[in-house]
Amino acid sequence: MAESNTCANHEAQRAQIQTVYTTLALQPEQAFAWGKGRANARALGYAAPWLDALPESVWESAAAVGNPFALGLLRPGEVVVDIGCGAGADLCIAAQMTGPNGQAIGVDFTPAMIAKSRDNVKRVGLGNVILHQSDIEALPLPDACADVVLSNGSINLAADKTRVFQEIFRVLRPGGRLQFADMVRRAKSDAATPSCDSWADCVAGTLAPERYLELLRMAGFEAVELVAWTGYHTAATTEGATFRALKPA
């Protein structure tokens, strides 16, 4: 019975997350409990050329909680995976930075977000992007295929974060980099907030930053660090933070 309840709770969480992010994709003009759009990205330090060059459709459904590109620039020719890519704002930036000889791969489990990301990629005219509708706890990618993995406000939405970091470690090449922004709890306890209703607002799934660092090390990463707090909030107990880590060469 306990296992059945756990599965039921997990499915309820997934359904709620998909409902909220489907609305964000299809009706971005609606009010949400957190910042979104071009103005939010500007406040988080996204570079002006990215903000000005990409059309409004790319930014309107973007709910960035930090700026993963501030953790290190991407190089031409690299393969970059964006997990929880949403409507494709970071994905489009990554594709432009890696250039025609590189590749940007987006993964998201909300169909409406994948559809919007695909439209945005076409609108921007990018030919080096691949999209997958998939759970980030089981990435549909081969081992050691990526130079960099990015994420922005998505890992906290996963029920099994240990599995997410194991999957990221698996798909990175030796020496590969993980650069991500996520919501964390600034309370002392690292137990997730027990309210299912707050998963989609990045509250119930959040952990203390020390727990994130521990999970990264457990997955095999080195040079693990919390780089900065972003000032982005979804509740009184949460704040955005940026992290980076390396897969051993």
Image (spheres, rainbow, N blue to C red):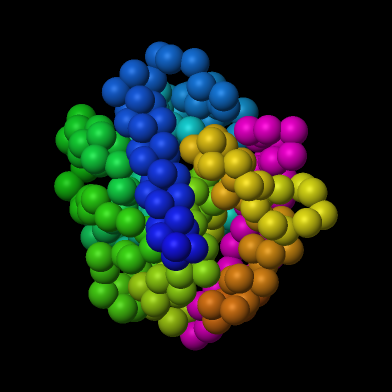
- Work out whether residue 141 or residue 91 is closer to the camera in this orientation and state it: 141
Q: Which of 67 and 30 lies nearest the eye of the viewer?
A: 30
Q: In the figure, 29 relative to 225: above or below? A: above
Height in image: 177 above or below 85? below
Q: Is residue 32 magenta?
A: no
> In this orientation, which residue lies closer to the viewer: 80 or 185?
185
Task: Residue 138: give x, y in percent of width and height.
Answer: 33, 66
Quarter holding the N terminus? bottom left
Q: Residue at x 49, y 85 (%)?
A: 249
Q: Is residue 227 among what the camera can see?
A: no
Snapshot quadrant of residue 26: top left
- Is 244 on the left-hand or right-hand side of 2? right
Above or below: residue 215 compared with residue 199: below
* Residue at left offset 31%, top offset 78%: 143
Left or right of 177, for residue 111: left
Instruction: State which region is magenta.
Output: 224-249
